[in-house]
Structures are given as structure tokens and as C-alpha cells.
Amino acid sequence: MAIPRSPDSGAGIVLGTPGRPWYRGRVISEHPLVVQKFGGSSVADPDRVRAVADHIVRTRRAGHDVVVVVSAMGKTTDELLRLAHDVSHRPSERELDMLLTAGERISIALLCMAIIDLGQPAVSFTGSQAGIVTDTAHGRAKILEVRADRLRDALAAGNVAVVAGFQGVSTTFDITTLGRGGSDTTAVALAAALGAQACEIYTDVAGVYSADPRIVPEARRLGRLSYEEMLEMAASGGRVLALRSVEFARNHTVPVHVRSSFTWEPGTWVQEEDPSMEQAIISGVTHDTSEAKVTIEQVPDRPGIAATMFRALAEAEVNVDMIVQNVSTADHTDISFTVPKEDLARTLEVMDKVVAEVEATGLRHDPDVGRVSLVGAGMKTHPGVAATMFETLAEEGINIEMISTSSIRISCVVPAGDVERAVRALHRTFGLDEG
Amino acid sequence: MAIPRSPDSGAGIVLGTPGRPWYRGRVISEHPLVVQKFGGSSVADPDRVRAVADHIVRTRRAGHDVVVVVSAMGKTTDELLRLAHDVSHRPSERELDMLLTAGERISIALLCMAIIDLGQPAVSFTGSQAGIVTDTAHGRAKILEVRADRLRDALAAGNVAVVAGFQGVSTTFDITTLGRGGSDTTAVALAAALGAQACEIYTDVAGVYSADPRIVPEARRLGRLSYEEMLEMAASGGRVLALRSVEFARNHTVPVHVRSSFTWEPGTWVQEEDPSMEQAIISGVTHDTSEAKVTIEQVPDRPGIAATMFRALAEAEVNVDMIVQNVSTADHTDISFTVPKEDLARTLEVMDKVVAEVEATGLRHDPDVGRVSLVGAGMKTHPGVAATMFETLAEEGINIEMISTSSIRISCVVPAGDVERAVRALHRTFGLDEG
């Protein structure tokens, strides 16, 4: 199935001043601009904040303009969420955004102080001050516009600009948050709006790996990935970059460099496919055990039935992922799909009604599943990858419950307990540890 | 000496929309408006936040419109300051304001959630969103204007409005803080701008007392004080209300009610003097051990010398408090003054130069002093209060180092170790424990 596109992937977004196309807003400067984003673990304590400041100042002194995007320190967001739930049974979404945005406010201020201490002028900006204008969907707001004039002025005056990730201001002037992976999205959106040379995403891992190194110790760091590969990896369980930030980067051709704020070594570049390079058949194996499988049995095979089902789920704001419709037997068919485990209860509630409505015979669900995926741009031109994948799993005695494919990805849903073994076997079979 | 007036005491302030006098902005409503301000100890943990929410909702249901001003929870501000000093040797003032304002952001959001949980709509506002416009002096900004339209709209829509105290936005769109006692000032400024019936200041004490109850267990809660008495008490060490908020209240005739958020009992009303009531000769005894005494010896007795000295201190941003010039002997005089202990080093640095410049003979300082003051509006019409005070201290064997008076206050600087004994003796002599 196609990778879902989120509304702020930048398709219709306004970047720059209204009435001016965003690319006209690109900074004309002798200093090429770099956007550097630091996640919560990168600024978890004062020592880490000072280390990050030092890296930023080195980048600035090497001749770059620098815009920094920073997340809340360490576990701050979790602590604020806990406070919210201590105070309220069901915290107001508007107030939750007001609360959580305090986290990045703290980190931008501290990071600026540390940069200034090193003799480099720096100015912090909240999402609102940085011109990140969003819709009004609290907790999952989409960026509608980036009005980066204030950032441009700060850069022109010789400052490093430090921007709070994950947050913006809505069209009705309320504070919003962008939801999961929001700081990555902030960074890429600013890189696009300002015409940055690159968007560097600093994190606690050294880049994107051929598999999760906690499961496959031989996993290799990938030097280079296309946007499409990164999208498929993000969508199928690779946790390094948020899906929507990769979409945004692809739509605006922002080169993204994923690297470690602990080693500062070069990591993984995510950028446009380079046709001159030979592509690896398989770049990596990803896995995901966050979803549950739901099967509707014996659905009457009539047009419009699937539409009824998935419209009902969409209205309940359930994020359906894989959908597989099995071969129709006589005039009935089974439809299976996966949903995030936290949406399972809601899904079953909705589907109970739908099953009755469409006169299906049953509803089954299984939370104990996991998905294993192979991703690789070279797959397109190498038939037989799927067959090798299925054989490998068969040799391991692992039962495949669902299969779905895209042009550069094959995913199998297998029992949760078999996921790690499947990842290791596939990594070995496809020679990913050989480099 | 006269009580210093801070620039945001409201003399020339614009309240309400520019171009409209502020009093025209008073809410015309069948619900009389109350501003309730809660200090950090009142919202120190989730249980306290819920208790405060309950009180607010009761006030609302009793038929009032309610604007709430809240400080950062418990020790949040101290913790943020510690983080700043962990990260930077000398934190940028702009970034310090960005950092510290995270504290009230957390408390407004949590308090709103708790209010909403009780079925009462509520909306939080940062200082900026509430229209608190200040000058650009980070860390000690003065309120220039209150643009309360957004608050009025929120009230008109039936909400409780919860505003972050202590903060505003400068004329150059940077986040500012109002300095010590800033949340009280926010509350009084909003009460003035919105034409509130009263400004209730909730704190961890039950009101203003005739002396510090930790030193004088018999101290009584005062039911009523004039603005002038409260000003003198605040200026001479009473820590309940910040001086500048009382000035603001007096200048706009905002009745202030200081009360406890732990007992919710009526506390102390601070309002215009009522000539029909008999005034207590002495309302209370205050004390202050936060200052050090500096003496310049043998200053040539020429016009302009004192001006030279205090201009130099003002330029170094030292807050001089009491100033006493002793009787001139021949053509020289001694000048003593008090400064906050944290300003002592800077003061001595400045004075070293001044002493040479004006050809004085010496510079002495003593950090081990304290000030004891008697405050009472009835003092004006009762001669002999000063004499009784000095006799009382003499009987206790306490040496008086400096004396200064206003029409409703007498202050003596005494050795720090004698302060508590002096407070107890004066409280007893003036019969303040009798009620």
C-alpha cells in the first residue's frame, strides 16, 4: 500500500512571506545555511547542552549560518504529561499544548545561554516567534506556513538562531504542538523555508542502520539513502526519523543528514536518488511490534463495503496501516488490517457496528503480531527478493500472516515472538552485515 | 526618606486599547469581576492545583467573572535558575527571561486543566497573549500597557481566564519578566485594566500581620490597611506584598485582599483610607536583614557632593535604600546609607572611586545590620511614638546605628543579632498583641 501522506508534507504549504513564493525567500548570503536539530537526549543535562553549544559554535566559525532546532530536554515532556494526568482526568488539548511547549522553551533558552558563553551571539525563538503557523488541531497540528522573516533578520545580524521544535502558533493565535516527531518536522520546514544547504538531525544513534543494532549486532550504518527508502523505513518501523519530516524533506528536496550528537561522526545522508550510483538491492530490515491485527471475516464481496469500513475508522481517527484483502471465496472475502495497539479498543468498537451493518460473519483480532520489512531501492530491478524473503522465513519455521508490498518494500506480519529471529535471519540472508 | 516609586506604578501607563482611556475599557457585565492571584506555594503540587481550581470555580459559580493570575509552581523558578547557572557563567538576560517564563506556562496550563475538569470552561494566556506590554529591560521590565481585549473576549464567552504572572512581551516582541513580586503586579495591573471589583492575592500566610509571626507568636492579623501603610510595610521588610504592586493598586484605587490559599479565610484588605474610622496608632512592626550599611567618613560639606555619590551608585544600578547624613562637624559630614547585601561588592567598588574624587577620608561598611520599623497611619497625629521606640530599644540595650522616618513610619538600623529582640520588644510596648 502507498505510504500515507500527512497534510503538512508540504504539498500546498506556503513557505516565506504570504504572496511571495517560498523559494524567493532563500537567504542570499556568503555563509551557506545549515539547520541543526538536536533531540531530547542530545540536550539531556547541562553538560550535554554545553557540548551541543560547542558543536554549534564550531559550525558557525567554519563559515556557516546556523539555525538550531531543539527538543525538550531528556524526559521533560514525559514529566509534564505526568503532571497533566495528576491534575486532570482528561487534560484539555489546548492546555496540554500550552503545557508541553514549556519544555522546548527551557531548552532553547539554556542552549542560547551556553552558545553566548562561548562568545557567539545567539537568540532563541519559540515556534510562534519563529513564524511556524499551524492549523488549530491541538496535539497534532500541521504546519500551514513558515514566516521566517524574524529568523532571517537574526541571521543577518550575525546570530545563531535557536528555535523551539515541535511547536507553532495556530491561525487563531493559540499555541499548538505538531505531535510525534514534531521537532524533526520543524527543522526540515525551516530548512526548506530558508533554503538551507542541509538539515542535520542529531540524535543518540550514529545514523540509519541496516537493522536495529539491539537485535542485530552486525548491523551496519548506511551512508546514504534516498527519500523513498527513508520513507519506507520510517513507515515500517525505523525510529530514527519521523515519517512526516522525511515527506517534507522530499517534497522540498532538503538534504537530511542523520548523525550522532555523542560521537559527532558523519552519519546517514538522506537525499535525492542519484541515478549514477549503483543501488543496494536491500538497504535494511525494519520491524515494528506496535500494531495489532484485525480481521473481518466473510465480508460480502460488494463494491463500497471496504469504503464503508475504512471511512468509519477514519472518522474515529484510527490510523489504519497495512490493509490486505484476501482472495474472495465465492461471494465473500476476508479483510485484514493493522492498527496501532493503543487504537485497538476503539477499532473493535467501531468494527462491531460495521460488521453488523455490512453483514460480515465475524471479527477477530490479534495484538501479538509484528511486522518485518525489507526496504531497498534496488529491489525494483531485482526480481526474486520476495521469494527469498518468504523462503528465509519458512526455513526459520516462521508463519506469515499478512503480506504487503510497495515497489521498494516487502512487509510480512508474523507472530510477535518470531520478529527478532526473522530480522536476524533476513539480515544474514541478504548479506547486509557484509558492507 | 520617601518611598521609591517604580516606573510601572502606573502613573503614565496606558490601560486598555491605545487611544481609549483605560477606564472606558471597564467590563460592563452583570458579573462583577474578581482577579485572583495565586503564588507558587499555592500551586506547589497537583493536589494544591486542584484545590485552587475548586476555589476558583466556586467564585465563578457565586456569580463573579474571574481572571486568575498564577506564579510558577513551588520551587520551579529556583530550579530553572540553577539550570541556567549550570549551563552558563553569566546567563544572557534575554534568555533568562525566555527560560523563567516556562514556569508560569506550566502552572497556567495545569490550573486550566483542573478548572475544566470541574466543568467550568477556562482558557490560559501567557503574559504576551494577555496583552501585558512592557519595556525592554529583561529581568526587571516595567509594564507600559495592558491590552486586555483577548481577556475581555474570553470572559464574555463565559470562561475563567488564567494568566501567567510575572511576564510580558516587550515593545520589540521579546519575552520579558517583571522581576521580584512580578505576579502581584500582573494581578493588580489586570484588575486596574479590567476594572475589577477586587484583586485577591492568595498566599501561604493568612494576611498581613502586626509582626512576623515566626518572631512574634502573638502577632495579630490586620483586617484593614491603607495603601500608604501597606507601602511602608512592604518597603520596610513586610514580605507579603511586593512594593510595586501596592503602588500600582494605590494609583488605580484597586482594592487588594491578601488571604491564605490554605485556609481560604478572609485576610487583610488594603484599600483607600477611610477617614470615618479611627486609625490604629501603630499597625505593625516590620524588619529587614537583607541590607548592609555603608558609611563615607568625613565628606567635605559642599553642595553637590551627595549628588555625585548617589548618581554614581544609580549608574551602577545599585538600589540605595535608607540615606542618613549625620550632623556636620566643622566643614565635614558623614553619610551613611543601606544597600541590598548582594549589591555591596559593587557599591564598594563604586564608592572607592567616589571617596577619592570627593576627598572624603574613609569608607566603612557593615553587613551585620538589620532594620526595625514601626508603621501606622495614626502616628501622624500622635507625637511621642519615636521617643517611645527609642526608649524601648535603649531598655533592651540595643544600639541604634541609623534612624529615618516618614510621616507614618520610623525605622532604626540596629545590629543584626538584636533585630528579633527589638521586634518582640516593640510589638509588646505598643500593645500590638492585644488586638
Image: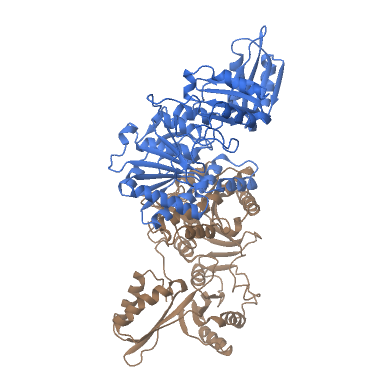
Chain colours: A blue, B brown
Q: Which residue: 42% across, 29% down?
A: A250
Most extreme residue toward the right is: A361
Residue A315 horizontal side relative to residue B338, left or right: right
Observer-nearest of B157 and A219? A219
Q: Toward which corner of the image does residue B360 lie, by quadrant? A: bottom left
Most extreme residue toward the bottom is: B330
Answer yes or no: is residue A62 visible. yes
Residue B399 horizontal side relative to residue A130, left or right: right
Q: Position of residue A202 (x, y in %)?
A: 46, 42
Which quarter of the image is occupied by the C terminus of chain B?
Answer: bottom right
Observer-nearest of A329 and B320? A329
Residue A277 horizontal side relative to residue A42, left or right: left
Most extreme residue toward the front is: A434
Observer-nearest of B77 and B303? B77
Which quarter of the image is occupied by the N terminus of chain B?
Answer: bottom left
Q: Position of residue A305 (x, y in %)?
A: 61, 14
Number of marks: 0
Q: Position of residue A123 (x, y in %)?
A: 39, 50
Answer yes or no: is residue B158 visible. no
Residue A309 horizontal side relative to residue A271, left or right: right
Q: Measured along the vertical axis of the image, is residue A33 above or below residue A253?
A: below
Observer-nearest of B24 and B48? B48
Q: Which residue: 60% across, 59% down?
A: B41
Q: Position of residue A196 (x, y in %)?
A: 36, 38
Q: Toward which corner of the image does residue A325 lie, by quadrant? A: top right
Q: Measured along the vertical axis of the image, is residue B261 above or below residue B351?
A: above
